[in-house]
Image (cartoon, rainbow, N blue to C red):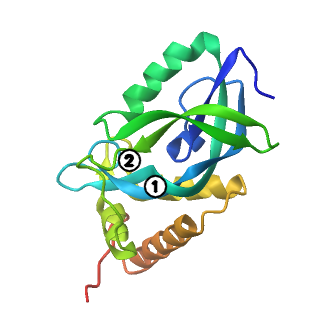
């Protein structure tokens, strides 16, 4: 049940597995009206301007399963300041309040970040091939882009959250990494066969 002495934050990417703030409870939740997409060029955390990676954003349409974090109101300003510093490095997201449904059916209003589709880092819809090329070749201040995608997929799976496209992408990334090791390629290198 929603409490008056708390607020909620909805995570759909790395916030699921690395929130970075204290919370009272974490609950599986679904946000309606937007879906998770690998659609933002990362120039900081998972890539550089020269070799951009891709990170997740919420784009209009459908729904998104993720994690809702209940945070005590005494931490409101501290947590929002942290989230803004983390998510708004280049102002690619809009901070919004959206209704999410918790795993027990309770509806709460949660702070989340949706992509600004007019921002120059919004990739639009890329082919799987282009996503793989970017993800396999990018590294930023927080590590490799591949690790970000695989960690997100792994944590969603542990929560029994099915994201078919993300799991397919993760499977291809894992297969490419395994084949690269067998061929003696250094970790993190993925060859695009062209054609």
Q: Position of residue 19 (x, y in %)?
A: 55, 34
Give residue 93's quadrant in the image.
top left
How far, Cα to Cα, is label 1 from label 2? 7 Å
Q: Quadrant of the N terminus?
A: top right
At x 32%, y 55%, the residue is 53
In the image, residue 121 sits, relative to residue 78, either above or below, namely below
Q: Is residue 102 left or right of residue 68?
A: right
- Image position, residue 15 (x, y; %): 54, 39
Question: Considering the image in quadrants, where does the C terminus appear?
Answer: bottom left
User: Foreground residue, 41 or 98?
Assistant: 98
Q: Which mark is residue 46?
A: none
Q: Secondary structure at mark 2?
A: strand
Q: Which mark is residue 143?
A: 2
Q: Which residue is mark 1?
A: 147
- x, y percentage for residue 178? 47, 74
Is residue 39 shown left or right of residue 156? left
Extreme residue toward the left, this view: 50
Residue depicted at 43% across the width and 75% down the height: 176
Q: Image quarter for residue 73?
A: top right
Please say if the residues under marks 1 and 2 sit with CB atoms less than 8 Å apart: yes
Check disc 1 and report its element: helix, strand or loop: helix
């Amino acid at each position: 049940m929603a409490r008056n002495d708390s607020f909620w934050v909805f995570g759909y990417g790395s916030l699921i597995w690395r929130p970075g703030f204290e919370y009272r409870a974490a609950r599986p939740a679904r946000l309606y009206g937007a879906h998770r997409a690998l659609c933002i060029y990362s120039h900081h955390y998972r890539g550089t301007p020269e070799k951009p990676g891709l990170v997740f954003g919420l784009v209009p349409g459908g729904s998104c399963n993720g994690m809702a974090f209940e945070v005590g109101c005494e931490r409101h300003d501290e947590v929002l300041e942290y989230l803004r510093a983390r998510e708004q490095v280049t102002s690619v997201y809009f901070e919004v309040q959206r209704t999410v449904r918790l795993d027990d059916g309770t509806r709460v209003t949660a702070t989340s970040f949706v992509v600004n589709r007019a921002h120059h880092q919004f990739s639009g819809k890329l082919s799987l091939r282009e996503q793989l090329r970017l993800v396999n070749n990018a590294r930023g201040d927080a590590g490799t882009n591949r690790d970000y995608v695989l960690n997100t997929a792994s944590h969603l799976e542990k929560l029994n959250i099915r994201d078919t496209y993300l799991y397919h992408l993760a499977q291809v990334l894992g297969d490419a990494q395994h084949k690269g090791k067998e061929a003696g390629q250094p970790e993190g290198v993925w060859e695009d066969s062209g054609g």
